[in-house]
Image (cartoon, rainbow, N blue to C red):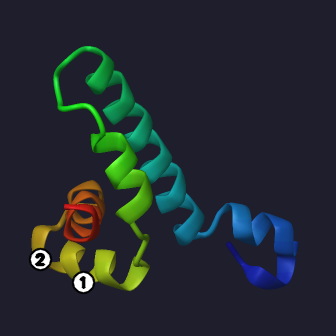
Amino acid sequence: MISRYSRKELISIWSEENKYKIWLDVEIAAAQAMEKLGQIPKGVSSVVRKKARINVKRIHQIETQVKHDVIAFLTSVTEKAG
């Protein structure tokens, strides 16, 4: 997104940080569903919600090694949330 043609509100919506926050929300929702189905232990989604942090720089570092943005994101989240 070219910043000189964009409003602040749009820049924040389309930022990488916001993209990863949305991805994290999706992962937490998936974990909640898997808890209800008994596929993972209860409380996993709560732990992820409390401990996970988005670190765009770290995600990029991992992505240079694994060559996949989603795997890099999940690896970064796992480093923080366990």
Q: Could you say whether the residue bearing mark 2 is in a helix, strand or loop?
A: helix
76, 2: nearer the viewer: 76
Q: Residue at x 28, y 55 (%)?
A: 70
Image position of 11 (left or right of 14): right
Q: How crowded is mark 2: few (under 14 residues within 10 Å), some or many (20 or more)?
A: few
Q: How crowded is mark 1: few (under 14 residues within 10 Å), some or many (20 or more)?
A: few
Mark linked to residue 61: 1
**Three-letter amino acid code at the position of disc 1:** Gln
**Three-letter amino acid code at the position of disc 2:** Gln
Say whether marks 2 and 1 touch (CB < 8 Å).
Answer: yes
Quadrant assignment for the C terminus? bottom left
Image position of 21 (left or right of 49): right
Image position of 82 (left or right of 5): left
In the displayed structure, 50 sits above or below 44; it is below
**Residue 39 location, quadrant:** top left
Residue 15 x/y as whole percent? 61, 69
